[in-house]
Amino acid sequence: MSQREPEIHDVVGVGFGPSNLSLAIALQECRTSGPDQEVSALFLERQPSFGWHRNMLLPSATMQISFLKDLVTFRNPTSSFSFVAFLHASGRLPRFVNNQDFFPTREEFHQYLEWAQARVADRVEYGSEVRSIRLVPGGAPEADRLRLDVAGSARRAGRVVEARNVVVSTGLVPNMPEGTERDERVWHSSEFLEKYRRTDPPKLRRVAVVGAGQSAAEITRFLYDELPHAEVYSVIPSYGYSVADDTPFANQVFDPGAVDDYYFGTEQTREAFWRYHRNTNYSVVDDEVIRDLYRRAYDDEVRGVERLRFLNLTRVTGVKRVGAETRVSLQVGPDAEVRELDCDALVCATGYRGMEPTGLLGDLDRHCLRDGAGRYRIERDYRVVTDPELTCGIYLQGGTEHSHGLTSSLLSNIAVRSGEIAGSIVARRAGRNAGRPVAVPVEVGGDLH
């Protein structure tokens, strides 16, 4: 480690996906409110460059949220970082409007994110992996800074950075079927395009996709269209795909106000929330994609071929290599009959596990309070509840579904969520500078403007 004095910032963000990108913008826009609002910030991202679900930028795949649910608009409709501002800067605004569509392609939305991050790039360091967050050595919990150990690289030696607040947003963790390991022919959907392009597609004669959600359905459609010579198997644990409920009343569950309803609700209210509204986001597929796949399967039947096959009520119980092929053990139907399927590639679109910052926090974890179920207790401003003597703020962008509900890590509420975190950090900084207690709660439903 370098022996020079560490950098000190008001806030350091760990990870730089859309959530912390939105936070960086919110903090930058604080500057226009006056010098007392200015916060020194640094964001550390282990990837070498910005990227968001790069391996799912499939042709014609569209966003499942309106373009108005961008990085800023619900917090600040006049922001120069909006998707509309991006379209104007790109010279595409009139043509986008002529499309008469609220849902841009995933590729275009990724271009928007890249455009936005380039404008705050002076606050971001890529290729910087945070290995641990801890108290300053020799410091008591009431010390006003935390120390982040940043791994070195071929270009830069490892170093330490200190922060008065830390915002952890390291993203979701890919989930594989139990006992299934990834290799060059067994992929998780998060690495799909990269792995697919490494293969020789004409040699893929039989491929299988596991999962019942949007990614599984989109990958199945992509493989069917891209590999006209191949058999495509869709392995689904349910009886076919379930349609996502994106009707207007159901979509209110993604409104900023719904976070308050969940956070301040009773346990009974929260249980009902999940029971009634899981079908807006989990293991569901857009109606258009479902109909596309059914139409392809029906056209196959009309032509007397069977190239797209749906294995309903089927679960993967094991995967092994047999020569050049991958042999998948399947448990089929209500009788749990076991079958085997040999394929050239297996794609597991089996979702993700929630962000879990415990390992990153290390010994700091003992200062973080938990609820009866062992989960972090979270303030309304997304700050982890800690021992009173720990005055630094530890914020989570993700991993707070149990406290804040469905939109905890989704794009739908990203602008307001980041605004609330930024507002909390600014208020705590002002309180610290004025000698007041720093545990300043964010105003419910408030933003920066």
Image (cartoon, rainbow, N blue to C red):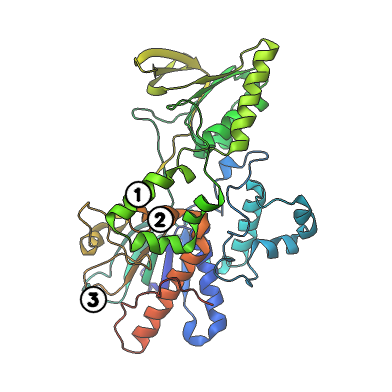
| Residue 378 placement: quadrant | bottom left
Residue of label 3: 142
Q: Secondary structure at mark 2?
A: loop
Q: Secondary structure at mark 3?
A: loop
Please state which of residues 139 and 23 is positioned toward the viewer in this rendering: 23
Which one is closest to the eye, mark 2 or mark 3?
2
Query: What is the quadrant of the C terminus in the image?
Result: bottom right
Which one is closest to the eye, mark 3 or mark 1?
1
Q: Is residue 103 left or right of residue 330?
A: right
x 35%, y 62%: residue:
263
Q: Is residue 138 above or below residue 247?
A: below
User: Disc 1 residue type?
Assistant: Ala
Residue 93: x and y in percent read 76, 59
Of labels 2 and 1, earlier in sequence is 1
Of labels 3 and 1, earlier in sequence is 3
Residue of label 2: 398
